[in-house]
Image (cartoon, grey):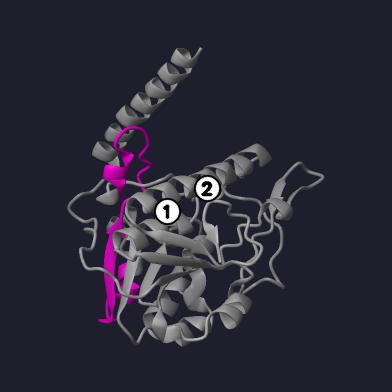
């Protein structure tokens, strides 16, 4: 029985390895992706998730902001905290924010975000984008005149199976990126921060799920900037917004994210990097709590 289980594990890892190689060949763009930093970062990095707890946790748990570097994500620049904290790094993971084929609503949201980043950034900022954004010109026209912003691209190619840590280390792929926190953690690791602190990583979506009388699966995705105004909505399957996810598809997406955090934590430990979760009442069970 043990032999059969081990054989199954081996075959699964081998299959995932072969599929990952094919994905890397097809989807990875080695000429544009960033190279991991060899410079040791002296300060801890705080990743600023957009969860409801962010503001209160920062006020209570951080006394001296100058002792840290910061990485913000997605719509953070549209809040007043962006100019207060002045993060050195920024990660945009949602493809709908820069893809040209998205719905008009999503295109407007993307334009609004990049406009905020461009107009507000008066300090050096490294902006990380999914490498698929390389062929999109919409965001370029908005931020190209701000010399403070440096663009770097990351690969969101899912890489699994044998030798996955090698490919993750050199930015050929990552854990399936179903949440912007996943590429943010890989960026933090590859930027050689030895201590990574998570704030605003509530991930408390399970209690925000519901199903309407029309059998629509709804999720109220609350953020620190809209915690009192957000409403339950369907989750889109694609950029065109024509199809919505079913309940089992939403839960499976959550499963992949939470599972991925355990894989990232194991990877970080092998790299000599510590990840700590400072988020109050976070649903993430992979990282040591502080």
Q: Per the image, is 167 magenta?
A: yes
Q: Could you say which is closer to the camera, residue 192 or residue 176?
A: 192
Residue in the image at 28% along x and 50% along y: 169
Q: Could you say which is closer to the camera, residue 148 or residue 189?
A: 189
Per the image, label 1 sits on a secondary structure element best described as loop
Q: Could you say which is closer to the camera, residue 26 or residue 264?
A: 264
In magenta, the rendered stretch is: 140-168
Per the image, label 2 sits on a secondary structure element best described as helix
Answer few, some or many: residues within 10 Å of disc 1's Cα (few below 14, many 20 plus, some between 14 and 19): few
- Which is closer to the viewer, label 2 or label 1? 2
Q: Could you say which is closer to the camera, residue 153 or residue 110?
A: 153
Q: Quadrant of residue 246?
A: top right
Q: Per the image, is 219 magenta?
A: no
Residue in the image at 48% along x and 18% along y: 5
Q: Is residue 146 left or right of residue 238?
A: left
C-alpha separation, residue under disc 2 versus residue under disc 1: 26 Å
Q: Is residue 222 left or right of residue 268?
A: right
Which mark is first along the chain, 1 or 2?
1
Measuring from the top left, give residue 159's x and y in whole percent.
35, 40
| Residue position for label 1 | 101
Residue in the image at 32% along x and 34% along y: 20
Measuring from the top left, give residue 113's x and y in whole percent.
46, 72
Measuring from the top left, give residue 272's x and y in whole percent.
34, 56
Instruction: Work out which quarter of the rendered image holds the C terminus and state it.
Output: bottom right
Q: Quadrant of residue 278?
A: bottom right
Query: Can residue 180 be seen at all in this image of the molecule?
Result: no
Residue 257 has which mark?
Answer: 2
């Amino acid at each position: 029985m043990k032999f059969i289980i081990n054989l199954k594990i081996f075959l699964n890892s081998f299959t995932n390895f072969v599929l990952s190689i094919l994905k890397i060949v097809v989807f990875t763009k080695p000429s544009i992706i960033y190279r991991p930093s060899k410079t040791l970062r002296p300060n801890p990095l705080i990743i600023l998730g957009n969860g409801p707890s962010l503001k209160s946790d920062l006020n209570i748990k951080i006394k001296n902001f100058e002792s840290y570097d910061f990485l913000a994500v997605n719509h953070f620049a549209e809040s007043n905290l962006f100019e207060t904290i002045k993060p050195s790094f920024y990660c945009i993971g949602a493809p709908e924010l820069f893809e040209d084929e998205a719905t008009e609503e999503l295109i407007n949201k993307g334009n609004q975000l990049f406009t905020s980043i461009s107009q507000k950034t008066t300090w050096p900022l490294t902006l990380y984008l999914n490498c698929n954004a390389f062929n999109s010109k919409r965001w370029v026209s908005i931020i190209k005149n701000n010399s403070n912003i440096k663009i770097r691209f990351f690969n969101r190619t899912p890489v699994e199976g044998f030798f996955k840590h090698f490919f993750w280390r050199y930015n050929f792929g990552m854990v399936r990126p179903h949440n912007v926190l996943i590429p943010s953690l890989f960026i933090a690791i590859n930027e050689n921060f030895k201590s990574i602190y998570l704030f605003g990583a509530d991930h408390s979506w399970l209690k925000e799920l519901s199903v309407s009388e029309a059998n629509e699966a709804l999720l109220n995705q609350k953020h620190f900037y809209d915690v009192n105004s957000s409403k339950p909505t369907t989750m889109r399957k694609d950029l065109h917004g024509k199809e919505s996810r079913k309940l089992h598809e939403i839960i499976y997406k959550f499963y992949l994210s939470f599972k991925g955090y355990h894989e990232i934590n194991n990877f970080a430990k092998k790299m000599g990097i510590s990840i700590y979760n400072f988020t109050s009442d976070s649903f993430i069970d992979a990282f040591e709590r502080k």
